Image: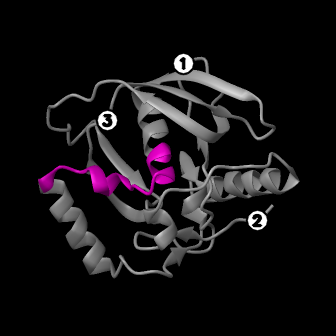
């Protein structure tokens, strides 16, 4: 088990579509174990493989939910069916999202309140569940990472401009930047 560095906005693996997992083997199990360790050390509610520099379609999560889904899990090669996203402006108090790869900042973002997730567990067994509310938000956020999108790519014009300024002031947007959970200060102050 190894805690891995978390890649930061600008690392190429974060900005391209991840590859399908082909083999459900011990190597995959070791990667998923590292992802759990890293997510936990970073105090994250989710972690996608590209966030630790691995371009594969895998994400882990840790979130209590009311959907009958285990509070901790992994989804390999997921597909998402996304409900309707309201055209209203995001609520700056109740719809704020952050990301371990955009450390220490967060912005309001409108997401669907419902998704259906299909994929596989670490052993290759099929998964099929619905997620609602914040759990649905988590699933959408992590799935986006597998398609090379960060939540800041989805912000409305007002918040996108603020995110770009924050990235520039932090020196992000270039390859090679990471932070180390459990070693570097927690960017979200947990």
Q: Residues within 10 Å of mark 3 (few under 14, many from 20)?
A: many
N-term mark: 2 or 1: 2
Residue at the image position 48 percent from the left and 32 percent from the top = 80
Q: Residue at x 40, y 64 (%)?
A: 102
**Majority secondary structure in the magenta region:** helix
| Residue at left offset 29%, top offset 72% | 167
Check if residue 177 falls in the magenta segment. no
- Residue neighbourhood size for the residue with mark 2, other residues' Cα within 10 Å, grouped as few (<14), some (14–19), many (≥20): few
Q: Position of residue 181 (x, y in %)?
A: 60, 67
Circle 2 sits in a helix, a strand or a loop, which is it?
Answer: loop
Q: Which residue is mark 1?
A: 67
Question: Is residue 186 among the parts visible in the rendering?
Answer: no
Q: Which residues are magenta?
A: 142-157
Q: Are marks 1 and 3 in contact (CB under 8 Å)?
A: no
Residue drawn 49% across the image and 56% down it: 17
Mark 1: give few (<14), some (14-19) or many (20+) Cα within 10 Å. some
Pick the residue in front: 21 or 129.
21
Question: In the rendered picture of this protein, how many numbered marks are placed on residues?
Answer: 3
Q: Position of residue 129 (x, y in %)?
A: 58, 21
Residue 143 belongs to the span the image colors magenta: yes
Residue receiving disc 3? 111
- In this view, the residue in front, 22 or 15, is 22
Which residue is label 2 attached to? 2
- Residue sitting nearer the eye, 88 or 134: 88
């Amino acid at each position: 088990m190894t805690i891995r560095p978390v890649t930061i906005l600008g690392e190429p693996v974060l900005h391209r579509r991840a590859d399908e997992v082909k083999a459900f083997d011990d190597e995959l199990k070791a990667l998923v174990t590292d992802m759990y360790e890293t997510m936990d050390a970073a105090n994250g509610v989710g972690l996608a493989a590209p966030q630790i520099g691995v371009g594969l379609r895998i994400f882990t999560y840790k979130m209590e939910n009311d959907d009958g889904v285990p509070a901790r899990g992994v989804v390999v090669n997921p597909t998402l069916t996304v409900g309707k996203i309201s055209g209203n402006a995001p609520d700056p108090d109740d719809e704020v999202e952050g990301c371990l790869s955009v450390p220490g900042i967060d912005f309001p973002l409108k997401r669907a309140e419902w998704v259906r997730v299909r994929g596989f567990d670490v052993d290759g067994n099929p998964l099929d569940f619905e997620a609602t509310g914040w759990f649905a938000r988590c699933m959408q956020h992590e799935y986006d990472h597998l398609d090379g999108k960060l939540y800041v790519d989805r912000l409305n014009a007002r918040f996108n401009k603020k995110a770009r300024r924050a990235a520039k002031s932090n020196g992000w947007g270039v390859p090679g930047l990471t932070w180390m959970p459990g070693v570097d200060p927690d960017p979200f102050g947990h």
